[in-house]
Image (spheres, rainbow, N blue to C red):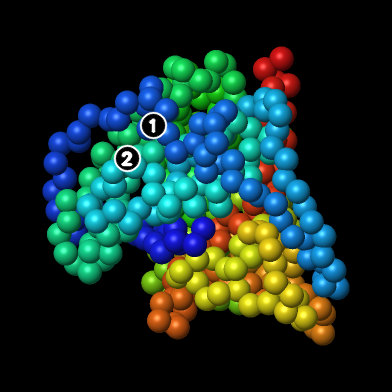
Amino acid sequence: MLRYTLALGLMAASPALAQTAAPAPTPAPAPDYASPAAWLCLPGRADACQANQDATVIAADGTRSAEVFKPAADPKFDCFYVYPTVSLDVTPNSDMNAGPEERAVAAFQAARFARHCRVFAPLYRQVTITALQAIMAGKPVAADRALAFGDVKAAWNQYLKDHNGGRGVVLIGHSQGSFMLKQLLAEEIDGKPAQARLISAMLLGANIGVPQGKDRGGDFKTIPLCTRAKQTGCVVSYVTFRDTAPPPENSRFGIVPEAGWQAACTNPAALGGGKAVMDAYLGAKGAGLRSAPQGPWTRDGAPVTTSFVRAPGLISAKCVTQGRFSYLAVTVNPNPGGARTDTIVGDVNVLGKILPDWGLHLIDMPVAMGNLVALSNEQAEAWAKAKR
């Protein structure tokens, strides 16, 4: 968690970045995903997706309790996770060696889903933070996004061949990972035999286009947005902003360029619409190096010894359309004079300055993590029932 947030949001600017990137070479052959070494996470082994997920539960009155995480002993469905922009490799595309940043993000974003599913997470030669920073500075860089997608596609096909066995699967991604899965859905799943295996796709921190006021069409031909908890074969997608700091005109989030379209917003805590209290799992110490550190969680300043904090009732959220933007508006519910803090971090902070166009991209997943995990299981049960 500590390092991956350096550039989670940079991939969201992908159309503009692609215009300044140097021409990419012909994609190299994909890694051998029949080898366990090509996977960041595989079921049945000790890896990042088995990282400790215990949380400290802090009530509004400041009282604390321990929540011990227990993964499923016999999970009935699978999760296929693609991680966001995290690689600190100095090359335009990353290598296939899992560094601390890849392991940290999987522990932070994917491991909690093991409460209900088997988690598969391929390594892939993603566009690195190094390349994206150079591109944003206007320098030509041979960052090859086709190479990255080719890896994800190859890993998906190997998963179907070697591991799926007819099981339902939830696709999970954030930022660059969501863009990879968006392309995978459009090219390899939508209207294809593999669609029968799709429980849902959780494409978070990315702009997914749908016709205005519609729940299908746009980026996907037949795959709709999720509008109820027991719906299957659908997409959950949103980007987050504070309700007090909506997207400014220069924001790259919550907007799509196509006329008559809007960015999808599906609140996993209220798929039918409206405002809901979120089941958030926040980083005990903050949201990473591009975020301000989290202050004390309680008035007494007592330290938190787990990596995660669950603060019931602290956060609410609602999908909002404002002008050209559609996003998940996050409200921190005040408790004046209470023993628990009313402050959360997650804004992108550079040299002490908050960048409002990024919103709360650093905590897109944490603000709804409990909801996402529970929803994956509810959808999986509905998928299995329909199959029977």
Mark 2 and mark 1 residues within 8 Å of each other at the beta carbon? yes
In the displayed structure, does residue 299 sit left or right of residue 99? right
Q: CA distance from mark 2 to mark 1?
A: 9 Å
Q: In the rendered view of the protein, which quadrant contains the C terminus? A: top right
* Residue 196: assigned label: none
Q: Nearer the viewer, residue 208 or 279?
A: 279
Q: Nearer the viewer, residue 195 or 99?
A: 99
Residue under numbered circle 2: 96
| First along the sequence among labels 2 and 1 | 1
SS class of the residue under badge 2? loop
**What residue is rendered at 28% in x and 43% in y?**
95
Q: Measured from the top left, where is residue 179 in percent x and y?
A: 40, 46
Q: Nearer the viewer, residue 70 or 235?
A: 70
**What residue is rendered at 17% in x and 51% in y?**
142
Residue under numbered circle 1: 37
Q: Image height check: is 247 above or below 47?
A: below
**What residue is rendered at 82% in x and 60% in y?**
65
Q: Is any atom of residue 139 visible in this view?
A: yes
In the displayed structure, does residue 86 sit left or right of residue 245? left
**What residue is rendered at 63% in x and 59% in y?**
307
Q: Measured from the top left, where is residue 148 in percent x and y?
A: 31, 41
In the displayed structure, does residue 345 sit left or right of residue 357? right
Q: Amino acid at mark 2?
A: Met
Q: Measured from the top left, where is residue 173 in percent x and y?
A: 49, 45
Q: Label 1: few (<14), some or many (≥20) within 10 Å?
A: some
Q: Measured from the top left, where is residue 250 in percent x and y?
A: 39, 72
